[in-house]
């Protein structure tokens, strides 16, 4: 559990510095230790949104909502992911 906390904190520090790729990697390492901890999924979804990886962000939010069906951050970030996907699709066809 200590390693999990350390990795999560490192991920949070990377987010504060705007290093989203590194942060996402730390959160991914956390997931190998605990797949049920929703905050690392919503945190990684935030990183993916910042990196324009909308499909990945949506997948992380979907995972959280299967565990906690009223997680507000997951709903919000999934909505942002859908919005990003819509904009991308619109730009492809215009």
Image (cartoon, rainbow, N blue to C red):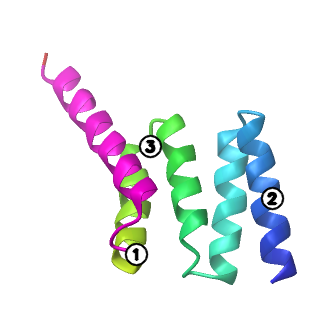
Q: Residue furthest top?
A: 94
Magenta span covers which residues? 68-93
Q: CA distance from mark 3 to mark 2?
A: 22 Å
Q: Which mark is residue 85?
A: none
Contact, mark 2 vs mark 1 (Cβ under 8 Å): no
The earlier-in-sequence mark between 3 and 2 is 2
**Secondary structure under badge 3?**
loop
Question: Looking at the image, which residue is at 86% across and 79% down?
Answer: 2
Give the residue pinned by disc 2.
9
Question: How many other residues sit within 10 Å of disc 3, few (<14), some (14-19) or many (≥20)?
Answer: some
Vertical relation: 27 (above or below) 63 = above
Q: Position of residue 93 (x, y in %)?
A: 13, 23
> Do we see residue 23 in this rendering?
yes
Q: Which residue is mark 3?
A: 53
Q: Is residue 1 above or below residue 16?
A: below
Question: In the image shown, does 32 or 37 lie closer to the viewer?
Answer: 37
Which of the 4 image quarters holds residue 1? bottom right
Residue at mark 2 to residue at mark 1: CA–CA distance: 22 Å
């Amino acid at each position: 559990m200590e390693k999990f906390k350390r990795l999560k904190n490192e991920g949070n520090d990377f987010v504060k510095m705007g290093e989203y790729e590194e942060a996402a990697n730390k959160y991914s390492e956390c997931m190998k230790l605990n797949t049920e901890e929703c905050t690392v999924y919503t945190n990684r979804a935030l990183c993916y949104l910042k990196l324009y990886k909308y499909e990945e962000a949506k997948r992380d939010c979907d995972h959280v909502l299967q565990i906690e069906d009223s997680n507000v951050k997951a709903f919000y970030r999934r909505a942002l992911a859908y919005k990003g996907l819509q904009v991308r699709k619109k730009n492809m066809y215009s």
